[in-house]
Image (tube, grey):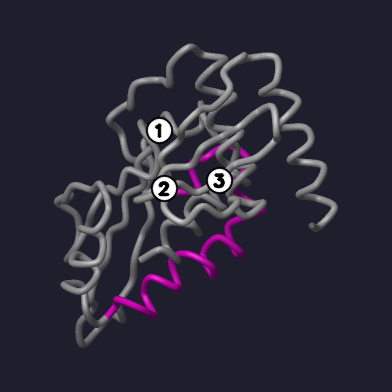
Amino acid sequence: MPMGYAQALDKAWGELAGLTKAATLTVRVLADNYEVIPGKKAIISSSCNVPAKDHLAVIILHYLTKKLTLKSLPEPAGEWIDFSQIADAGSYYPTFRKRTIDHIVRKFGEHPEAFLAIASRFKSRKLALLDASVAIEVMDGVEIGIALSKGDDEFPPDANILYDRGIAQVFCAEDIVVLTELVVHGL
């Protein structure tokens, strides 16, 4: 495991330890449930009975820590923002764009109907933005909006990824990048 993830996991498990005495906690991520077992420092996929990958484990632990610290997650603010409006997001934008928005455009830019069909596999709702858009509930109370423009004779296809303004109360910019990659590459 890369040193960065080892340190992040150790820190996240340590933060969670003082917040719960539960033997098992369950977190839904997209279409799968994960069993979090604090005593064993394990996170197991319920659908395939394998451990969560390190990057996903960190996200799940940060989500649980915030949820337990706040007693419940903040209600959605009802205002969509893009990545540039998230605190400390600036330095991540080139990587974010390459790994998420560009990926969506390459995969679905010419076929927004395919994008809508695939997104419907997840807990989602349509949005009234561009040619095709949905809000996908990644975890309970955490949505990511994806809006796709198929382009025309003048402009190439493009996309944007949106967040409820309240996401910054749950995740830092780096976590939001990883969470968004999970969604985009799950489509």
Q: Quadrant of the C terminus?
A: bottom left
Left or right: 106, with 110 as reference point:
right
Residue 26, image x, y percentages: 46, 32
The amino acid type of the residue labelled 2 equals Asp
Per the rendered image, the range of residues in magenta is 83-109
The amino acid type of the residue labelled 1 equals Arg
The amino acid type of the residue labelled 3 equals Ile
In the displayed image of the protein, which residue is found farthest to the bottom?
A: 153
Left or right: 120, with 30 as reference point:
left
Q: Are marks 3 and 1 in contact (CB under 8 Å)?
A: no
User: Which is more N-terminal, label 3 or label 2?
Assistant: 3
Q: Which residue is mark 2?
A: 82
Q: Which residue is mark 1?
A: 165
The residue carrying pointer 2 sits among few (fewer than 14), some (14 to 19) or many (20 or more) residues within 10 Å by Cα, namely few
* Mark 1: secondary structure: helix
The mark lying in front, picked from 3 and 1, is: 3
The residue lying at 39 percent from left, 80 percent from top is 106
Residue 82, image x, y percentages: 41, 48
Total count of labels: 3
Measure the C-alpha gap from mark 2 to mark 3.
32 Å
User: Which is more N-terminal, label 1 or label 2?
Assistant: 2
The residue lying at 48 percent from left, 57 percent from top is 182
The residue lying at 33 percent from left, 26 percent from top is 77
